[in-house]
Amino acid sequence: MKVPDTFITRELYYQAFKEYDEHQTLKTMEAIVGRALTQSYHKRLAYMEDKRIITLKEYSKTSQDSYSNLLNKADRQTIEAFQEKGVWKIGLHAVVLRKSSPGKNTGVVLMSLSVII
């Protein structure tokens, strides 16, 4: 599996190989590959579930969290964010909050995460 540069820095990548050569440990490489697999999983699920894909910056405008906080969460993979061409994105689905009257769907729609943390 090719691990793109967007998941890691080159220094960390080469450090993982050096760590294995010197100590025969795989902790750093496991973290790198694990993060890559998790991001790939989030991306595939977002597209398979036909979620609305928006940038993390766009999501931060409606979120309670700041953009920098969301970037940190995305990097740690504590939210379902993924990178496409170096841009952090997230998949959302629409939830109807209220309807004005029975039979008429003129409700307010709020974009939210599909998984409640």
Image (cartoon, helix red, strand yellow):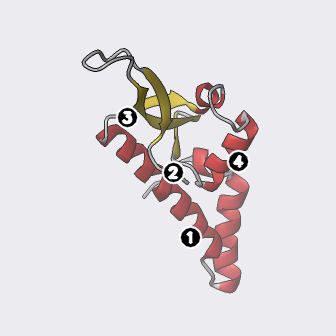
Q: Nearer the viewer, mark 1 or mark 4?
A: 4
Identify the residue position indicated by label 3 in the image: 51
Q: Give the alpha-carbon distance from disc 2 to disc 1, as whole Å.
A: 27 Å
Identify the residue position indicated by label 4 in the image: 72
Query: Of label 2 and label 1, which has the lower sequence position?
Result: 1
Residue displayed at 59% across by 44% down? 6
Query: Of label 4 and label 3, which has the lower sequence position?
Result: 3
Identify the residue position indicated by label 1 in the image: 30
Query: Of label 1 and label 4, which has the lower sequence position?
Result: 1
Please determine whether, in this image, residue 58 is positioned above or below residue 49: above
Amino acid type shown at disc 1: Glu
Amino acid type shown at disc 3: Lys
Residue displayed at 34% across by 38% down? 47
Element carrying mark 3: loop
Q: Give the alpha-carbon distance from disc 2 to disc 4, as whole Å.
A: 18 Å
Query: Of label 2 and label 3, which has the lower sequence position?
Result: 3
